[in-house]
Image (cartoon, rainbow, N blue to C red):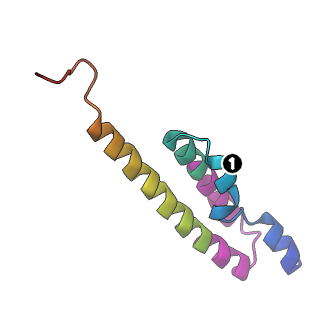
Amino acid sequence: MRASDDQRSVPQLPGRSCERSRGMSSVERLDELIARLERAGEQLRSGELSADAAATLVEDCAALATQATAELERLTRAEVAAPAPGQDTLL
């Protein structure tokens, strides 16, 4: 397998889908990040990547995990700020 073949099978870098994710909700962005991490995991488990491509993919996964953490924090802050259903503010 040539090095260029390995690079084609590596998922896109985290920043490549930023334009597409601008119109997405935090939940949708989180779902997209999870899907990308799952695809990367499948590729790593397949054993078809060279050592260099696998190392690059692991670094990309770390960046994706960081983005997922940020989305979870946004969701958590939004839930804490909003009152629970049926819990109106007292006057």
How would you rate the neighbour count of disc 1 (Cα within 10 Å): few for under 14, some for 14-19, many for 20 or more?
A: few
State the residue in front, 30 or 44: 30
Give the residue at x 46% y 51%.
Answer: 71
* In this view, 75 is above or below 73: above
Task: Give the position of the C terminus as an image quadrant.
Answer: top left
Give the left or right position of residue 19, taking residue 69 as reference: right
> Which residue lies under the disc numbered 1?
20
Instruction: Please identify the residue farthest to the left as the structure is shown.
Output: 91
State the residue in front, 79 or 36: 79
Query: Is residue 24 visible to us here?
Result: yes
Number of numbered discs on residues:
1
Give the residue at x 80% y 72%.
Answer: 7
Give the left or right position of residue 19, taking residue 1 as reference: left
- Image quadrant assignment for residue 76: top left
Give the residue at x 87% y 76%.
Answer: 4
Instruction: Please identify the residue farthest to the top as the structure is shown.
Output: 86
Q: Is residue 51 magenta?
A: yes
- Residue 68 percent across, percent down from the top left: 49, 55
User: Given the image, on which type of amino acid does mark 1 rest?
Assistant: Arg
State the residue in front, 91 or 82: 91
Instruction: Please identify the residue farthest to the front as the structure is shown.
Output: 91
* In this view, 4 is above or below 42: below
Query: Is residue 45 visible to us here?
Result: no
Q: Does the magenta stretch include residue 43?
A: yes
- Residue 54 percent across, percent down from the top left: 68, 74
Task: Give the position of the N terminus as an image quadrant.
Answer: bottom right
Range of magenta residues:
34-58
User: Magenta residues: mostly which secondary structure?
Assistant: helix
